[in-house]
Amino acid sequence: MKQTQSPFAKIANTSLVVQILVGIIAGVALASVSPDSAKAIGFLGNLFVNALKAVAPILVFVLVAASIANQRKGQHTHLRPIITLYLIGTFSAAITAVALNFMFPTELTLTPSQTAVTPPEGIVEVITTLLYSVVDNPIHALMNGNFIGILAWAIGLGIALHHASDTTKTVFGDVAESVSFIVRNIIKLAPIGIFGLVAKTFAETGFEALLGYAHLLSVLLASMAFIALVVNPLIVYVKTRTNPYPLVFQCLRESGVTAFFTRSSAANIPVNMQLCSKLKLDKDTYSVSIPLGATINMAGAAITITVLTLAAVHTLGIEVDMATALLLSIVAAVSACGASGVAGGSLLLIPLACNLFGIPNDIAMQVVAVGFIIGVVQDSAETALNSSTDVVFTAAACRAVERQAVQERLAK
C-alpha cells in the first residue's frame, strides 16, 4: 500500500525555488496574522544572511587560490570578455535610467535628513578607496568582506602555490571542495531564512511607507526590469547568438530571488557559485568572475544613482542637456563600480552625482534619506539585478568561448 506523503514532505522534495516561494508566502501570511510573531521569527533570516556572509569570503579565497594553483599550462579563464560585459551592462543601465527620467520626470518632497552618513567627496576618492582595498591586510579583508582585497591575496597565493608540490595543490583543492560542501548545505536553508526575512520586513514596514513614492519607485523598477529583460538578453544574444531568455530567466529565478531578500551582493556569492556549477561553467572562470562581479558589476546601483539624482534635478527645476546627461551616465557607472556590496551601498554615492548639477550637499543628503525610505524595495530589486547579472554575463562569455571552439573544430 502506497504511503501518502505529508504536505511538509512534499515541499521538502520539490525544487529549492518552489521551497523559497512557499517561504515567501508563509512569511507574508505570518506578518498579516501576527506582526509580533513575524518580528520575532526574523532572527531566522538574520542567521541565514550572516551565515552566507561568513562563508562567502573564505569560499572566494580558497576557490580562487586553488583554481590558480591547479591551473594547467595554456588554460585561459576568459575574464577579459566578462569584465567588458560588466562595464557595458553598467553603463547601459545608467543610459536607460537617464532616458526613462526624461520620459517620466520625477519630483520629490524633500524633508530634512536624519541619516548620519558620510558620502565620498569625489570620483577620485571612490577610485582611491578601491585601490586601497586591493592592498588591504588579508585577515582584515576576510573579516570585513573586502572582496577586492580577498581576490588580490587569493590570486597572489594561487600564483605562488602554482609552483608548489602536487600534494600541496591537492590539499588546497580538497579544502576548497570542503568549503563548497558547507556552502551547499547553508543554501539548503534558504527557504527558512527567506521566510524569516519576509515575515520581519512585512511586519515592520508593509507598503504604507512606500505609497508616497509610487512614481519614483515605478521609474526605478521599470529601469531595472528593462535592463534585466531587454538589455541583458540583447547583450547575451550578441555574445552567444542563441536564445538568451532561458538563461536570463533561470538566473533571475535562482539567483535574483535570493538576492532580492538578502539585499547583499556579497551574501549572494555562494548562491551564484552554486548556480554556475549547475550551469556547468568553467570553475576557474566563475570562481573569479562572480566575486569580482559582486564588486564592479553594478547595473542596479547605476540606475539608483541616476534616477534619484535626476529626481533632485527635476525637483529643483534645473535644466539638463544631453551632454550633461551623458556625463551623469559615465559618473554613475564609474561610481556604481565603487558601491559597497551591502544594503544601501549605492545611496551614499548620490551626493557625488548631485555635485555635477551644483546641488548643495544638504539637499543631496535629503535625497539619500528618501532612498533609505524606499530601500525595502529599491535596494532589494537593485541587488537582484546586480547579482543575477553576474551569472548571466559569466555564462554568456563561457558559452561564447565554447561556441567559438566548436566552430573552429568544424572548420578543420
Image (spheres, rainbow, N blue to C red):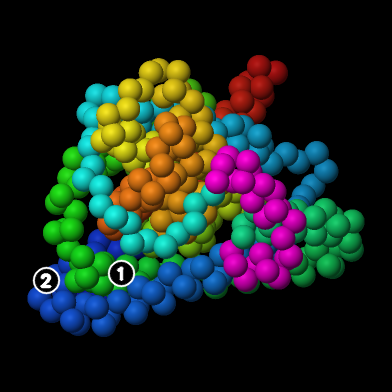
- For disc 1, the neighbor class at 10 Å (few under 14, some 14 to 19, many from 20) is many
Q: Nearer the viewer, residue 161 or 57?
A: 57
Local SS, label 2? helix
* Residue 32 against residue 258 in the figure, above or below: below
* Residue 175 against residue 151 in the figure, above or below: below
Q: Position of residue 412 (x, y in %)?
A: 70, 18
For residue 49, side relative to residue 123 (left or right): left
> Which residue does the numbered mark 1 point to in the structure image?
197
Labels 1 and 2: the sequence-earlier one: 2
At x 33%, y 33%, the residue is 313
Res 340 seen here: yes
Looking at the rendering, the stretch of residues picked out in magenta corresponds to 121-145
Q: Position of residue 94 (x, y in %)?
A: 42, 32
Q: CA distance from mark 1 to mark 2?
A: 14 Å
Q: Nearer the viewer, residue 31 or 163?
A: 31
Q: Position of residue 40 (x, y in %)?
A: 26, 82
At x 80%, y 39%, the residue is 74
Is 371 part of what is drawn in magenta? Answer: no
Q: Position of residue 317 (x, y in %)?
A: 27, 29
Local SS, label 1? helix
> Which residue does the numbered mark 2 point to in the structure image?
32
Q: Nearer the viewer, residue 379 or 241?
A: 379
> Which residue is most to the left?
33
At x 62%, y 57%, the residue is 147
